[in-house]
Amino acid sequence: MIKLEKRYDVIIVGTGVAGLNCALNVSPEKSVLVICKESPDKSDSYLAQGGICRLPEQDDYQCYFNDTMRAGHYENNPAAVDAMIRGSQEVIDDLIGYGVDFARNGDGSLAYTKEGGHSRPRICFHEDTTGREITTHLMSAARSRRNILIVPYITMLDIICDGSACYGIVARDGKNGRLYRLFADYTVLASGGVGGAFENSTNFRILTGDALAICMRHGIPVDHINYIQIHPTTLYTKKKGRRFLISESVRGEGAVLLDKNFKRFTDELQPRDIVTAAIRDRMTKDGTDFVWLDMRPIPREEIMNHFPGIVQHCLNEGYDVFRECIPVVPAQHYFMGGIRSDTKGATTMPRLYAVGETCCNGVHGKNRLASNSLLESLLFAKRAAQDINSGYSPIDMSAATAAEAALDLSKYSNPTRLLNEYRAEVRAEIARCAAAESKDGAN
């Protein structure tokens, strides 16, 4: 059993690509604690199928920028989009340096695939398990660092703060129930999205937006909390639990969507929200619970090489993608809103950072362009670590101790109830913001 120290230089909440890349870029002489609710592989980063964007050549910059802005309904933060695109080649180089094996062409150059909303192929990939490939290598690198401690089954219940700065977190050990109050010079929230708060989602059920609720309770701004992306194609099932994603790359390589009469009804390579709307409209008109996805236009060898995981999962569910269509339905997938942060990951509270899906720096606007998520998470997590390194200073221990003493420990006596309250608050705020936006749109 791992016993946690009272103080660390940096505490990171989350073991997805954002949390891991942040940890790997913190100065090696600093102690870094990385925690997660369950096992480290229970992150949506691990589940990512399609790939990760990279600017293939400088001539594509404006086109890539326009694609991202168009998908986001031009509500994106242009500075964040610019930083993401310009940093994309460095991110891929970093990943290759960690041993990530991206698909290659015959001449050894990176192979690119295309997804909805992209005007050209610019997505690096590893079969249909890109997220697992990246996360596994980052995890291996992090575990090899003497300054990084990764501890699973630790749930953040609160932050320690006094309104002027964050001094660490309150956390609970899920194995023995021990309550920790941990100090840190810097705290980084990289705890993922909100899918666990929805009935139908591609996300792990543990991702319920706790960090959002905690920030809201402490007056830390949360932006666009109702900007929820629905993925057009998840495998239809009546079973409960996480929905299995059918990667957008499948449509990028030639798969088509068909109605109940097996007639094509939309352009499959439009941005996700448009395809989702088309599917829902068709389901309503046809009176069905799903539409069909036909992968047979894709060459058999390409399907086997690029989508082996999808092929096997469909077989397990009784569908042979080489001989028949598969039923698909939209489901909650990604969160574009989140804790307000700048392009260096800093929130409005000193010493508190937010990166990855749990933050909102405006890069995605109202709708994320396919395969920008891993890139955004990795890039801005690295920038957060660099910002911490460049301006590093220790916390005021007298202020931190006073903030700890002011905690009402009775709030944490029933963690399950507290987490349910957080989930309910997030859902309520999503509904409130959605209603307000709908009312504004009607005026």
Image (tube, rainbow, N blue to C red):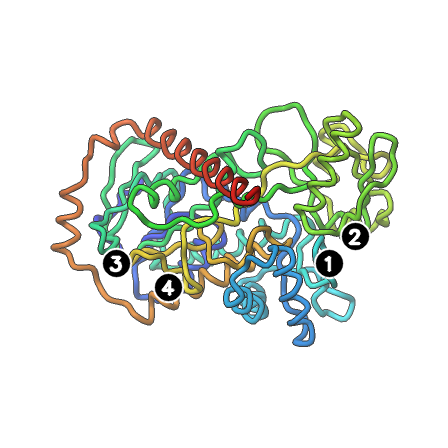
Q: Position of residue 190 (x, y in %)?
A: 42, 50
Residue drawn where x is 80% and y is 41% of the image: 257
Quadrant in which the C terminus appears: top right
Q: Position of residue 25 (x, y in %)?
A: 41, 64
Q: Are marks 2 and 1 in contact (CB under 8 Å)?
A: yes
Q: Is residue 70 above or below residue 170?
A: below
Give the residue at mark 2.
Answer: 253
Give the residue at mark 4.
Answer: 26
Describe residue 272's horizontal placement relative to residue 27 as left or right: right
Q: Closer to the observer: label 4 or label 3?
A: 3
* Residue type at the position of mark 2: Glu
Give the residue at mark 3.
Answer: 185
Residue drawn where x is 55% and y is 57% of the image: 75
As measured in the structure, the alpha-carbon distance from the residue carrying label 2 to the one carrying label 1 is 7 Å
Q: Which mark is residue 282?
A: none
Q: Is residue 410 above or below residue 293?
A: above
Describe residue 131's horizontal placement relative to residue 251 as left or right: left
Q: How many marks?
A: 4
